[in-house]
Amino acid sequence: RPPSTPRAICRRRAPRQLGNSFTTSSIDHHIFKPMLGLSLYALAADPPPFHPVSIPHSGLVDGSSSTALISALASSGVVAIKGIPGYAALRSDILAATPACAATPAAAAHTF
């Protein structure tokens, strides 16, 4: 026999609706607890440090490091070039000019 009042309809359908949908406790238990566990595991596990292959600039110029360069790029895609002539002075100049560059209107208007 169908319910006759709106209140009776709501009482009758509410348990079915809650049973077929997520409640706050089921979301916490089935989604957030495993995510929290994975997050804590990721924080606790120390990944091994990454050290890119370092290739001398002179080896790139004379071609003696070409095999090492190709191998490093194929394995990790990252290579450190050391001994670049004039790099230390250029780096120092750029770092000294960075605050002035950041204060320009163009830099201030840029969205990062």
Image: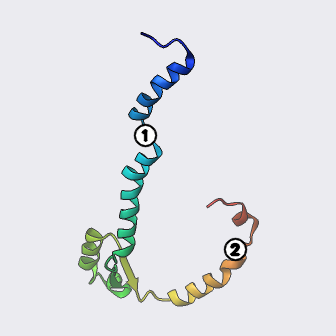
84 vs 100, left or right, is left
- Which type of secondary structure does the marked residue at label 1 adopt? loop
| Residue that appears at 66% across and 78% down | 98
Above or below, 28 relative to 54: above
Q: Which mark is residue 106?
A: none
For the N terminus, the image quarter is: top left
Which residue: 45% across, 11% down? 2
Give the residue pinned by disc 1.
22
Q: Which residue is mark 2?
A: 101
x, y (%) of residue 92? 59, 88
Taking the spot 47% from the left edge, 89% from the top edge, the residue there is: 85
Residue lying furthest top? 1
Residue visible at 23% across and 77% down in the picture: 67
80 or 38, nearer to the observer = 38
Image spot of residue 49 (x, y percent)? 34, 80
Tell me: residue 56, above or below residue 100.
below
Q: Position of residue 86 (x, y in %)?
A: 51, 88
Q: Amino acid at mark 1?
A: Phe
Q: Residues within 10 Å of mark 1 (few under 14, many from 20)?
A: few
Whether residue 101 is situated above or below residue 11 in the rendered picture: below
Q: From the viewer's perspective, is 66 left or right of 9?
A: left
Amino acid type at circle 2 is Cys
Q: Nearer the viewer, residue 104 or 60?
A: 104
Residue 33 location, quadrant? bottom left
Query: In the orientation shown, which residue stands out farthest toward the right?
Result: 105
Q: Of residues 19 and 61, which is closer to you in this image?
A: 19
The answer to which image quadrant residue 102 occupies is bottom right
Count the labels in the image. 2
User: Nearer the viewer's eye, disc 2 or disc 1?
Assistant: 1
Up-down relation of residue 23 to residue 16 (above or below): below
Snapshot quadrant of residue 54: bottom left
Q: Position of residue 89 (x, y in %)?
A: 56, 90
